[in-house]
Amino acid sequence: MSWVERIQSDIRITTGDGAVYEPLYMITEKSVEYNIATFEFPNIEGTLVKRGTPKGAKYTFKLVFQGDDHLDERKAFENSNRDSRPWVVNHPIWDTMRLQPTSLSYDPTGLNTSVITGEMIETIRDDDAIKSLTDPAEKTAMDIQDSLDNSIEQFSNNLAPTTSDVNQMSDDVADAYSLGSESVMTEDQFNEYFDLFNTANAAIAFAAADVSAAITAVQDVLIYPFLFTDGVKNRLNLLRTQFEKLGTSVATMTGFNEKTIYATNSGVILNAMISASINPEPGDYGNVKQVFESIDIILDVQNQYITNLNLLQTPNGGQEDSYIPEFSTINSINNVVNYAVSQLFAIALDSKQERVVYLDEDSNVIVLAHRFYGLEIDDSTIQQFMDENNIGLSGILEIPVGTKIVYYV
């Protein structure tokens, strides 16, 4: 079939409740992210980079209902999408897909049209997913500890600290602590964090005599912020800031030791980010948008980590100051990230999905809370609706036509 014939075909969407819709559509993009590349460093010159299997593709859709009954069609489509099961889509360009909408926005304010925009990801069937008997959080925590232990072992075996290295380790810990101490929210954690900082400084001073104790103490400081009493997003953003601070001098690093210290410490922060992501506070993953925020932060840092190691790597290992990243450490971090992100995607697919509507008539919080959530005796759904839409007292009486309203299904 030619491309002309394809684009003249209709799109056919079967929603989770089994209803079928054939709206007009606009051709939009598709993006595919691959599981993070793994570095392998065999006993030959150069580097082999392997690309993993693709993750679920992401799509942006723009659908249009038009005509005298477009408002009725839009409302029917909106009601169908209260069902959170995935769509089956026959698309003229992308063929047949199984998609899970992560957000949908309904705009009925156009002349003779209702426009629906949405973001969605491709999903496999539940029956196709691998069933694990191991608790994902427990497995991830064990994998992180194995990664940290491996990092200590490789660091101790490959590096004999000089005075310059001691200064670098001390600066890294001081920079991380300075940023982290501003985010501690409880006195007990502040005191424990401060004790770890002092212990690390003492161990670093004697790194030449006991390098293993020194790098272990450094790890204890760098990974501790994942435990902070705070939301996942705030902890991840703090750790990202610490990671970025650590990498400010990557472009000027020259020696093997200097690069090894950076690779080790930045890898610890990446492990800390995964630890934070699997230890959410209540409400952290209340909807799919919150889960994807965590995934995006982690993958951004992972990609920057790999980019930085590429910059630090020398063409071969034949010179005195040559540097090639240590494979087992990089591989263990890569495996931790890939597994944790896959579990976060699973959480996202089971989380509440965002819906957005633009009011086609004046309303108020009681009517809208009843429309989207139903009313409870304790008025909890009214308060939930007001919180999600940042509605104050004035909105209790009237919310004007055209207002953007967010709710979750």
Image (cartoon, rainbow, N blue to C red):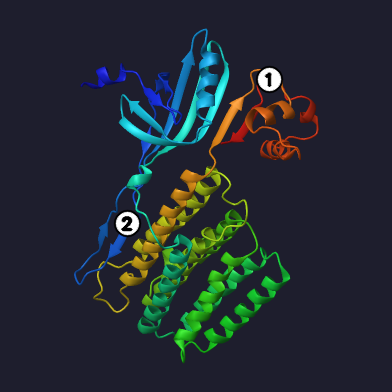
Which residue type does callout 1 highlight? Val
Q: Position of residue 9 (x, y in %)?
A: 31, 18
Which residue is painted at 67% across and 71% down in the image?
189
Which residue type does callout 2 highlight? Ala
Which residue is painted at 67% across and 66% down in the image?
184
Q: What residue is disc 2 on?
A: 37
Instruction: Tell me if mark 1 has few (under 14), some (14-19) or many (20+) residues whose alpha carbon lies within 10 angstroms of its own.
Output: few
Residue 159 at least partly seen: yes
In which quadrant of the rendered view does residue 139 lie?
A: bottom left
Task: Estimate the spatial distance between the alpha carbons at disc 2 and disc 1, rounded to whole Å.
Answer: 49 Å
Q: Position of residue 14 (x, y in %)?
A: 40, 26
Q: Nearer the viewer, residue 252 or 264?
A: 264
In which quadrant of the rendered view does residue 203 lie?
A: bottom right
- Which tag, 2 or 1, sits closer to the chain's start? 2
Which residue is painted at 70% across and 33% down in the image?
375
Q: Secondary structure at mark 2?
A: loop
Instruction: Tell me if mark 2 has few (under 14), some (14-19) or many (20+) residues whose alpha carbon lies within 10 angstroms of its own.
Output: some
Q: Quadrant of the N terminus?
A: top left
Q: Secondary structure at mark 1?
A: loop
Which residue is painted at 36% across and 40% down in the image?
57
CB within 8 Å, label 2 to label 1: no
